[in-house]
Image (tube, rainbow, N blue to C red):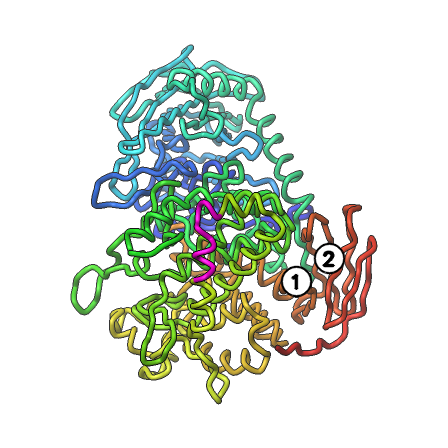
Amino acid sequence: MNYSTGQAEYKNWCVAEERFDSQFLGKAEAIFSLGNGYMGARSTTEERYVGEVRNTFVAGTFNRFAENEVTELPNVADVIAMEFFFNGTRFDLTLGKIHHYKRQLNLKRAELVREVDWEAPTGERYVLEFRRFVSLADRHLVGQRITITPLQEATLRVISGINGQVTNSGVQHFIEGEKRLYEEVYLQQVQKTTESKIDFVLNTTHRFMKQDTPVQVKGLIQMDRRKIVYDFKQIALQANEPFVIEKLSTIHTSRDNDQRQADYTLESLREESLTELKAAAAAGYEAKFHQHSAEWDQRMWSALDIKIEGDDGFDQLAIRFAQYHMTVMTPAHDHRMNISAKGLSGEGYKGHTFWDTEIFLLPYFIYTQPKVAKSLLEYRYQTLPGAHRKALENGYEGAMFPWESAWLEDGEVTPVYGAADIVTGTATKIWSGFIEQHITSDVAFATWQYYQITGDETFMEESGYELILDTAKFWSSRLEWNDAAKQYHINQVIGPDEYKEHVNNNAFTNYTAHWNIQKAMEYKTVLEQTKPALYERLDEKMNLAKAFAKWEECLPLLYLPAIREDGVLPQDDTYLSKEIIDLTKYKQQTHVGSLFEDYNLEQVNEIQVSKQADVMILFYLLEDLFDQKTKQANWSYYEPKTLHDSSLSLSTHCVLASDMGETDLAYDLFSRAARIDLGPNMKTSDHGIHAASLGGIWQSVVNGFGGVRMLNGQLRINPRLPKAWDRLAFPIHWQGERLECTVTRDTLYIKQVTGGQPVSFTHNGNLYTIEREIQLALQPEVSETR
């Protein structure tokens, strides 16, 4: 991979693959993936290869194949694939000779371009250019443009259409529907999911050109099981004369938020989608691409681009790569949907939503696109029925959010079994769906964080207060009385460190549950006094008087692990008593999870080793509860025992290292986080990009090096640039105002772009107010204490 390609206006905007290797298809398919939040498509090549994974997903269209399986995003029929034959020889890069190859994702234009100079086994040469986009301006549209220039006369055959013979790793989620050809040029295929009964309508059409002039090419329409294609035969190509194929495709579903009207019919969806494709075809590839590119510039890069000036252009590219993927994977158009742990770039985690959204991705949207952040939280509000059901099934009250979530009514969708146990030879049980319960306080925290940063009282009245109160009801019912200690404990859980299962009193879980209950008590009192009508409505739902009495009784008795004399906060009741082994081999690993080549999970559970930040992320979220000395002591204890086997871990440690003034260490951690997907390991992204790590990259830049933090409703900006950077510029939104922040080695400059209320913030313990703009000389930061 080459990560700093692109010249002039595209410098540090491009990610390129400069050598074709069929052994490493997965990484490029994932990191080059295209999308618009409505749908996402892995960037498989047009021609097919062994080992490829052809995935196209439409957000929110979950289906369950069988009773003993969990719901997942179904792999939609493939509209990308095309077959090419030159003089009867199949175009195949594993055959013949490649004289030039380059595949490049241009982040600024959100376009994938592949250039190939190929010599067939028979000796003829062909120069091909493939262009592709998934439109941000028209969420249903996929565009492809292939230019073929033979270096000698040739005969071309092209087979192209819609192929529904794809699966989710062997699982077919669709009932085959009707296939049709309209007006001899428009192909249409209908699918319906087996269990959720969602209709899909796919359309595609082709246009051919020579010397920018459309030409008629005759083909034979063919239909097979789940497949409709055109076979265009005997196309005569002239030497050195470019021949252009444009293919435009659309995907629509009955779950689309513009298809919820009472008079929906499949027939109307078919007609509307076909009409839309005809309009796109009339405009042509170039016109539709320019609309798409302009939308990217207007919605994203003109408004949200972050600029890093320094020694290494890779850093600039990395933050743009993160912002690009957070756009293509986020269903900003529909608040019934959320972000998958792999976005829409692969089958990993089945399209499910985790705490990744609330803790790692949501801050980006809160600070940059508050409306999108609100939509993502409204999704959680709409899944409350599933959270209530899970609580009741486990003998609790209130809202117990699923560890993995899918469609609104699905409830808990975590698979029960996963990878092989190397000792027993059986499948390892996934306990997260049963006992990784901190997700509930994560949702409450994200709700509160959104409110503090945006001041969106309407959201709180409609959804937010209820989320915080309902989750607190769960926690008070979840507590277990320890008669010997005269305390409430939280037993048998998994904290953020998933290498420790069935632990008691995980610090992160206990502290955030305590925070959740405390915040609910505050809001119950405020609502009762200031919003009586709203309080009455919520009281009718949740019996708040009874809930408050329980909170009041249990909160002072909820056990919070205490900091030891050496400054270390126990991760749980037993972590510090477990065996200590030499982890050097695993800290220096070239691929994550190498620990499980020597130990099974049961054995790892008895070793002082952590998958990811646990106590440390507690210090990040609830930082005002702990002083800097405590944070440093725990860093020194836990970081050497943390393998960062989760992609969520490095960015958290980066921000904390920056807080501690360890900018060299912070920059090293940022660089490692940025290379999770963009790095040289060619297998890391096979199952899809690491969505949460991309949010973590933004947090490293803005919350870490930019020093932006919300602390109890107050904006704080304490920047610390790494030595490799000379200048950092980024936008943030605060309480409805847009601020543009620029940090150099000597100054912090903030411009208030919108003309609303003045914005106050603290810097190194001093309070400042922005009146249009402010510039401060940067001084060594004063350590903040409890």
**In the displayed structure, does residue 104 sit left or right of residue 510?**
right
Hey, what amino acid is under mark 2? Cys
**SS state under label 1:** strand
Tag on residue 708? 1
724 vs 459: above or below: below
Reading the image, the residue beneath label 2 is: 741
Q: Residues within 10 Å of mark 1 (few under 14, many from 20)?
A: many
**In front: 721, or 562?**
562
Q: Nearer the viewer, residue 773 or 445?
A: 445
Dot 2: few (<14), some (14–19), or many (≥20) neighbours within 10 Å? many
Looking at this view, name the residue that lies furthest to the top. 183
Q: Residue at coordinates 52% horizontally, 83% vertically from top-left?
A: 633
On the image, the x and y values in percent for residue 188 come to 38, 20
On screen, residue 784 versus residue 596, left or right, reads right
Q: Quadrant of the C terminus?
A: bottom right
Q: Is residue 707 visible?
A: yes
Answer whether labels 1 and 2 touch (C-beta < 8 Å): yes
Q: Which residues are magenta?
A: 539-549
Query: Residue 379, relative to residue 250: is it above or below?
Result: below
